[in-house]
Amino acid sequence: MANIILCPGQGAQIVGMGRDYFEKSDAARKVFESAGNVLGFDLAKLCFEGPDVELNKTDISQPAIYVTSIACHAAASAAGKMPTADLQFAGLSLGEYTALHLAGVFSFEDGLKLVRARGLAMQRAAEANPSTMVAVMGADEPAIEKLCADCAQGEVLVPANFNAPGQIVVSGNVNACARLTDAASAAGFRAIPLTVAGAFHSPLMQAGADAMKVELERVTFNPPRSTVYSNVTARPHTDPASIRALLVDQIIKPVRWEQTLAPLANDPAHKFVELAPGKVLTGLLKKQNRRAEVQSLASADALA
């Protein structure tokens, strides 16, 4: 049996996130206060009060989610509500950094500096290349690959997130994504253009990947104390050098969340815990196996 801790990624942010943990848990409050000291601005205020337009910026939402998830974990641990044995960690995109910190690969402070740098690097890459993302419902990987090949017309258009069976997100140039939206709808799939800063997990993020390669070399990495799954390979991470390389690749390659969860979700011996904020990963897990046993810590009420 394994206790698998699920760590949310970008998109889970919402104004007010983490406030209940901050108010009810000394351990969570210390995490938020430490984050403010490291960053040099009041991240807790942005999490609790917004505004939306600020919290949704890539360079703010990434550290905000990282800190909220770790504050949630700290509060649950202090309350004796967090599993301590047979641990495994899986984080979606940004959440992989949360997972790696919780598995002892790097310190909270170093992880926070990394996700802040990651958000800035990805924001700049997005601004340099007008681009976007489209969620496609009902298609499998071969169908998506064909749609991308047919609609690219010399532009970038690639699968970016394999979230769950029948739920794949595509990244690319704005016009290429528009062509794919029309073609997917004509093929009988549901295509939903997303409101995002740019084409994450695509070659259009190469400048961001190059910047993060430099940042990652500045941080001390330890071998993980527990299993942590890589978004790029859907397999457990191994040594520090490989982890660094895969975190660079993660920015320009697709997130294979469906492939990560499939063998885990269908093992009845496994139990899952999703950290705050939100319940996105619980929803994706249930698409793999409706009977999977999962506890959401989206609210501090879960610790009562």
Image (cartoon, helix red, strand yellow):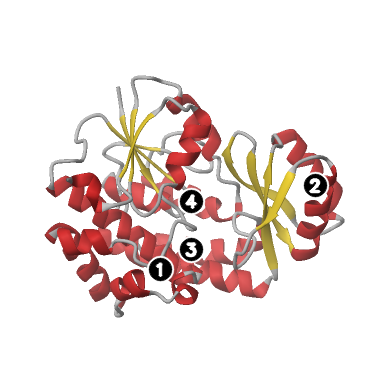
Determine whether the residue tagged by mark 1 lies in a helix, strand or loop: helix
The image shows residue 288, relative to residue 170, as above or below, that is above
Amino acid type indicated by mark 3 = Met
Q: Identify the mark nearer the N-term, 2 or 1.
A: 1
Amino acid type indicated by mark 1 = Arg
Q: CA distance from mark 4 to mark 1?
A: 14 Å
Q: CA distance from mark 2 to mark 1?
A: 37 Å
Question: Which residue is located at x 47 percent, y 40 percent?
Answer: 283
Amino acid type indicated by mark 4 = Ser
Q: Identify the mark nearer the N-term, 4 or 1.
A: 4
Q: Estimate how packed mark 2 is, as few (under 14), some (14 to 19) or many (20 or more) residues with alpha carbons within 10 Å.
A: some
Q: Estimate how packed mark 1 is, as few (under 14), some (14 to 19) or many (20 or more) residues with alpha carbons within 10 Å.
A: many
The image shows residue 83, relative to residue 149, as above or below, that is above
Number of numbered tags placed on the structure image: 4
Residue ID for mark 2: 185
Q: Estimate how packed mark 3 is, as few (under 14), some (14 to 19) or many (20 or more) residues with alpha carbons within 10 Å.
A: many
Determine whether the residue tagged by mark 2 lies in a helix, strand or loop: helix
Q: Quadrant of the C terminus?
A: top left
> Residue 212 bears which disc, if any?
3
Q: CA distance from mark 2 to mark 3?
A: 36 Å
Determine whether the residue tagged by mark 3 lies in a helix, strand or loop: helix
Given this view, does label 4 or label 3 mark the residue nearer the observer? 4
Extreme residue in the bottom direction = 41
Amino acid type indicated by mark 2 = Ser
Question: Which residue is located at x 35 percent, y 34 percent?
Answer: 294
Question: Which residue is located at x 20 percent, y 70 percent?
Answer: 33
Given this view, does label 3 or label 1 mark the residue nearer the observer? 1
